[in-house]
Amino acid sequence: MKVYAGLAGIPVVKSSISYIDGQKGILEYRGIPIYELVQNSNFLEVSYLLVFGKLPKQTEYDQFLCDVKNNLNVDSSIINFLKDIPKDTHPMKVLQSIIPILSAFDENKDVLDEKHHYSALVRLLGQTPTVLAAWKRISEGKEIVEPDFRLSYGENFLYMLRGEKPEKAEGEIFDKCLILHAEHTINASTFTAIVVVSTLADFYSCVSSAVGSLSGRLHGGANERVYHMLSHIEKIEDIPKIIDEKLSRKERIMGFGHRVYKTYDPRALIIKELLEKLIKIKGDNIPLYQKAKEFEKVALERLKEKKIYPNIDFYSGVLYSLLGIPPEFYTPVFAMARISGWIAHCKEYLKENKLFRPTQIYDGGHNIHYIPPEKRE
Ligand code: ACO
């Protein structure tokens, strides 16, 4: 028997939700290329596509949008809880702890009932942005901003977070970033979600567990670290030296490398295009952007030979910083977008549910006897 470390390359499910060709840099959601979705669709429509397996008809979309918007407000008990916890709690921890509590307000409790799938989806899509924005405002000692139902999904989040209405184009760019983050086959957090659903725990527990998994720096936590790495660079001329020092210390370059992509992560290319669009609105004299471009160029020269390319996290932090989103909210934004992907997988997995129960190769001792505390060395 052999241990498959990290289950690398081991299929654990059959899935029709998304497809990656890591050699060619292809990503499709339900067979549609990611680039086409970013160009033509919006985040909520893509969420519907992922979870229900088809693009919605107009009436289906209108109903879905209405159900998400009807769930934008969170109960006052949640806001009171947020006011009571330490202000320096990381928003990923806040998200991970609030999500299971949201289940208390959902009357559809049975994970095997389709009604639970729908109500958990619209509640989590509706309330996660509100909880995150409220937490940002509360942690800064500011008044929370109520959701504005007239705004688009992306605009409303930026509005609640910043306290002022964003430009329409900012909302659109942000919405497209959410599409890019919505789904990515069986990665660590999605695997976590299906392991939890295999026990027949409800979707709130699945999503909350997935949030914990996403928070690690080898997964979703990389975007925040990229931002800090770039912000700490004082002069652009220092970049080659900084990268060489990191590599000689065998340090990982955050925002580079991917378990599956051995070429450019297609999402990294699209997010760079979106960033360039945003730069046109904001003006190109943005030091963080200049540093990111130079860093990407030099790091790529050093790492290309090993087939290590920028991933989506390399530019997402730079883009989010220009939208006024603080670094500690980059990974929570990723989580907010991934909810539909996680739920799509949980729903799909339940169709032929099998409780996950891998095995191990035991390599410890046997017949070892108990030693009383006073005799221990
Ligand atoms: N910087 C420098 N070297 C790297 C990097 C990197 N970012 N990534 C991999 N390598 C090197 C390793 O040091 C190793 O070198 P060696 O063979 O000389 O020892 C080689 O590439 C293979 O490394 P593995 O760990 O086997 O590669 P794996 O495919 O498992 O790594 C991972 C994937 C974890 C994402 C890695 O590339 C990494 O740590 N990247 C930085 C963190 C990051 O950006 N994470 C976000 C991923 S995307 C996402 O979750 C949305």
Image (cartoon, rainbow, N blue to C red):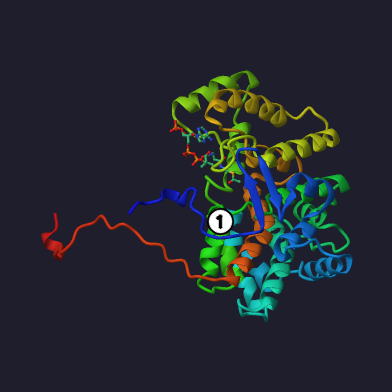
Residue 307 position, x and y percent, is: 56, 31
Q: Position of residue 147 (x, y in %)?
A: 80, 62
Q: Quadrant of the C terminus?
A: bottom left
Q: Which residue is mark 1?
A: 189
Is 52 left or right of 96, judged from the image as shown? right
Position of residue 182 relative to residue 372, above or below, is above
Type of amino acid at the residue the image marks with label 1:
Ser
Give 170 or 117, whichever is nearer the viewer.
117
Q: Is residue 293 above or below residue 14?
A: above
Q: Of 45 and 57, which appears nearest the observer?
A: 57
Q: Nearer the viewer, residue 15 or 286?
A: 15
Quadrant hosting residue 67 = bottom right
Residue 97 visible to an observer of this rendering? no
Q: Is residue 288 visible?
A: yes
263 shown above or below 203 = above
Pick the quarter of the image with the N terminus.
bottom left
Picture coordinates of residue 81, whole percent (x, y): 62, 68
Where is residue 268? Give x, y as percent. 68, 38
Mark 1 residue crowding within 10 angstroms, few (<14) / some (14–19) / many (20+):
many
Which residue appears at 74% of the width and 65% of the height? 126
**Extreme top residue here?**
237
Left or right, 374 with respect to 108, comes to left
Which residue: 61% across, 53% down?
A: 185
Secondary element type, mark 1: helix
